[in-house]
Each structure stands twice: as structure tokens, then as C-alpha cells.
Amino acid sequence: MPQLFDELKRRNVFRVGVTYTVIAWVIAQVFDLVVDNFGAPDWVMKVMLTILIAGLPVALVLAWAFELTPEGVKKTADVPVSQSVTPRTGQTLNRITTIALILVLAFVAWDKLGPDSAPQENVVVEKSVAVLPFADLSQTQDQEWFADGLTEEILNALARLPELKVTARTSSFEFKNTNMDIGDIAQRLGVAHVVEGSVRRIGDDLRVTAQLIRAEDGFHLWSKTYQGNTDSLFEVQNDVAASIAATLNVILDEDKRARLFASGTRDVAAFETFLQARNLFARAHRREEGNPATLAAANRFFEMAIEQDPGFSTAAILHSDRYAHFLLEGPIGIVGDAGELDYDSAYAQLQQDFDFAARAAPDDARRIIVELNREFFSNHWHRLPVLIKQFRSELGEDGTIEDDGLWLDEILRFSGDLDLAWRLAEQRREADPLNQVAWMDSINLLIGRGAYDEALAMIDEGRRTAGEGIRFVETDIQAYWLSGNNAAAIETLERNSENSDIADYFPVLLAALQGDMEMATELADAIEMASAHPAYRLIWPYYVMGDSERQSDLVRRIDAMPVGASMLALEIGNNAGMLMFDLENAPNFRKRLEEAQIDPASFASPPPRTD
């Protein structure tokens, strides 16, 4: 036996086995990568692995039976031991093995530490939770708005704790009135725990049940029933949130308790009125066909809530949204009762709401957000750079923001603070994966930096996760057009021609990309004549048409409006940071850029015009 072992060693059989194994592993990894990229069926990889495994004994037999000599391959039995060159061959095999091992280590390091080739979906963090809409068990079934509001306040309280990953309202409420299994819901949302409960309210009597469930096995980690009246509402909210946090091993020091219990109001009547206002506010923004909810109706309740609690900052922030929409888009349906508004009164009310909300803000971060919005919609932008710097400092490295950021994402993207914009966009997308809007900021940022393939991949992922939506169509078209793939942009526009009621500029853009400038002009004229309010979304189609005269006239009219600079800034932000018009036609906007210390050269350059 020792002699056999020595002979195996002399003939390099062991070295051949090691070298073959290492090289086979490298070949398998490379082949697996190629198979994945080309979408080959699973059997292809299985065949390759079978061949590699079967080749090992063949290699060992060949190493035993043959020897590589300077004169070529000979049978080992025909080569005298004194003339054998197996030591030299062994050294060569050692070098080959060493190189192969280096490749193995490099591949492992890249696989573990390098960038992911694709985003990992639904990576579950242990300290993660989704708060599902509490059921309305009231006798008359008319307290749904109250149950929804209670749910959202508990959700918002937990979201103020940086240790917890909390699913945002839109995604959690996607499962309202469904019978889906808790485990399946948690898997879709990428959370480890789910909170569910119920509300029963009769007059002032209140009964609330809540339970924290571990999604993996359905085990109830905590549950409690609260019996009292509406005066104890805030105590119930606070206790539920604190109990959930403690159960998930979040240590609540004094600072974290203050964050957890920071509510917009401590007045129960104002809070109930606010919940009704916010219900109408959310319905109005869905802009569903046949939906009678408007921001005018919501604002009547916001105004009542502010009367009941004169320090209610959040109510004032949301109250401002009606006037921002009117100033940006004109007397559209979401505004409601638009005949009572004019631009000067709407602008004055917008600034008044911002002033009130800033004074009453519960903390510095939310005050700065309000002031950023106020500055963005004002007739001067001197403070924008300072406010963004303050906001970054206040937020810190781990800070999160609540959903009252209003136009914050657009402001950051337009002003060039792309790192912070990306961080907040990804934070929002992770927290609200089923909300189509939550995907848009990340996608726009990718398009803005020219990462068109990544943007298109994220659009596809967004569709798979959150469903189809008009915003995905818009970004699809942008990415195709900017990457020079006009054929794909045209095909996308043709497939979505039915969305022209939502995106009225689609037919204009389609005609322009098809080269039918007469039709594009006719369609654009119809949009311009339909409203006295300048249609700023036509800036892009006019650019594609090469119609400098019409675009210049449109830009000049926008620039002269009370929030014209904001409209032009939003158009640049919504179009991947591209400056598609001549600043000579926008003197007010150009002055705002100078005040904000924004260099126009920092904007992206669009493709050449067609003219």
C-alpha cells in the first residue's frame, strides 16, 4: 500500500485530481453565469455538471497511465523512472492550481462583497412590521374612517423609531377587506411581523383590540383589548405602539418615547375631524373616475380641525395642497369649487398655510421641510441651499421622514442634492413597495444619471410589485427616448393611447416622434385652448417637435405666473433633470436659479432636436 501511494504521488495523480477539481469549479461558475444571462433551461446546467463530474475519474486514469514527455504523450510504463519528468510536470500543475485558486477566491469575494447583479426582493428584517387596517366592528359600520385613522397613527408612531422597518400606509392598506393569509401578506411586504386589530365605537364608548403576529408561524407575540371612551384614544394609540416596540426588543429611552408619542394634536375632537379630512384628502388624490371627493371638501374639515386646535401643524400642511394644485395645474377636478379661486388669493393662502405650519411644527425636521416647501413656492429662493443643509444635518445618517414631505423629493432632485434624494427615495420605496408613486423618485434619479437599463429594469420590477400605472408608462417613454430607442417609445405610446385623459400630452408626443408635425401641432393647440392655464407638460413635446416658437411662448407665459419658477423646476425634475428650453425666455426662473446657487450647466442635456 505505501508503494502504491508513492507511485500515485510520483505520477501526479493527486495533483491532477486537485487541479481538475478547482478548474472544474471555475468552469461551472462561469457556465452558470452564462446560462442565467441567456435564460437557458435548467437541464443545460445539469448536463454540464454531469460532464464535469464524469471527467474526474477519466483525468485520474489518464494521469496514472500516461506521462507528458518532451517527445509527447507516452505510456507511463514505457518511460524509465530515471528519465521521467513528472517532478517538472508536478510543478506546472502546482502553478496552474494556484492560479485557479486565485480565480476561485476572487469570484467568492466578488459574489459576497461585490454589487448585486439584481435587487433582492422582500429581504426580511427581523425588526420589521406592517400595521394592517383595523376592522370597523361598530354596529352601524360607519366608523371606517375612524378605524383607518387609528391604524395610521399607530403606524406613524412606529415609523418614528429608526430601529424598526415599518411598511407605509399605501402598501399596508392594499390588503384592506381581504382574506389573504398573514404569512402571504408579510411575504409581499417583506416584513417579519404583522399588526391587526379592530375598533368598535358606539357614541363615546370605545373598544379596541390589537395583536402582534409573527408571520413565520402565525404566533401571537402580544395582544390586548382596550375598553374605555374616546377621551382615552391617545393613550390607546401610545400603549399599542409602545407595546409593539417593546415586544420587538426596541429599547425606549426618553428621546425615543418622545418621538413615539409625537402626535399632530392632543385634542380628541380636532383629531377626529382631521381623520375625516384626511380620508377625503386621500380619496381626492386617487383621482378615480366618478369619485366625488375633492380637496375643497377635505379642506373644510382641515379648517374645522385647526379651529379646534389652533396649533395643528399637519392639518395646515395638508390644507396647503389644494392651493398648490390650483397654482400648478389650474381649475382641475381635484381642486374642487375652483371658481372661487384666483391665482393671487390661492398664492396668498398657500404661503399663509406654510407660515402657520412652520410656526406650529412639532420638531425641527418637520419645520425645515415646511420651510423648504414655502421657499420653493415663493418669489425668492435665497434660503434653499441653507435649508437643505439644515435638513440634511437634522435628519442625520439614520433619520426617516413621515409622509408630509409634500414636494420635498422634487426639491432635492431639482436642486442637485442627488445623494440625499436617492437615500430618501430608496427609503420610501422600501417602506411602501406596493405604492406606484414610491417607485418614481428612484426611477427618475436613475434616468437622470443616464442609467437607462437600470431604470427600465426597476420599472419592470415596479410593475411586478405594485402593478401597472401611468407613471411607469411615462418613465418607460423617457428612458427609451433618451437612450435613442424611438421605436420602443412610439410602441409604448401607441399601447397607452387610452391614457390620454390622464396624460393629455401623450398623443402630441406620439405624433411628434412619428414625424407627423401637423397632427402634433393640432393636438397641442387643442390642449392649449382647453384651459387658460399654461400646459407646462407640453414643453417636452414642443422640444421633440422642434417648435421653438411655440415652446418659447409657453415658457414665457409660465415664467410670468405666481409659481411659474416652481412649474419650470418641476418640469425639469419630472423630465430626468433635462433643461429643454431656453433660459432667455424665463428671466424669473433664471433669477431664482441664481438665488439658489444652482448652475444651469448642472442640468442634463436632452437629445438633439428633430429640426
Image: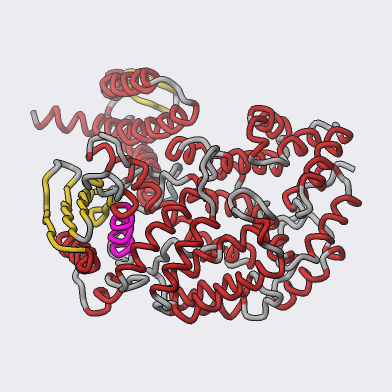
Q: Is residue 241 left or right of residue 85?
A: left
Q: Is residue 480 left or right of residue 65?
A: right
Q: Residue at x 19, y 29 (%)?
A: 7
Q: Is residue 190 above or below residue 580?
A: above
- Residue 217 lies, in percent from the top left, at 14, 41
Q: Residue at x 72, y 30 (%)?
A: 487
544, 558: nearer the viewer: 558
- Residue 585 lies, in percent from the top left, at 86, 63
573, 260: nearer the viewer: 260
Q: Residue furthest left?
A: 1
Q: How is the image coloured?
A: secondary structure
Q: Quadrant of the N terminus?
A: top left
- Residue 432 lies, in percent from the top left, at 40, 50
Q: Is residue 263 above or below residue 332?
A: below
Q: Which residues are magenta?
A: 148-159
Q: Residue at x 44, y 61 (%)?
A: 403
Question: How many discs mark residues in the rendered view?
Answer: 0
- Residue 195 lies, in percent from the top left, at 22, 51
Q: Main secondary structure of the magenta part?
A: helix
Write down the quadrant of residue 205 in the picture: bottom left
55, 480: nearer the viewer: 480
Q: Quadrant of the C terminus?
A: top right
The answer to whether residue 118 is magenta is no
432, 346: nearer the viewer: 346
Looking at the image, can residue 553 be seen?
yes
Q: Residue at x 24, y 33 (%)?
A: 14
Write down the quadrant of residue 232 in the picture: bottom left
Q: Is residue 355 left or right of residue 62?
A: right
Q: Is residue 585 above or below residue 527?
A: below
Looking at the image, can residue 193 be seen?
no
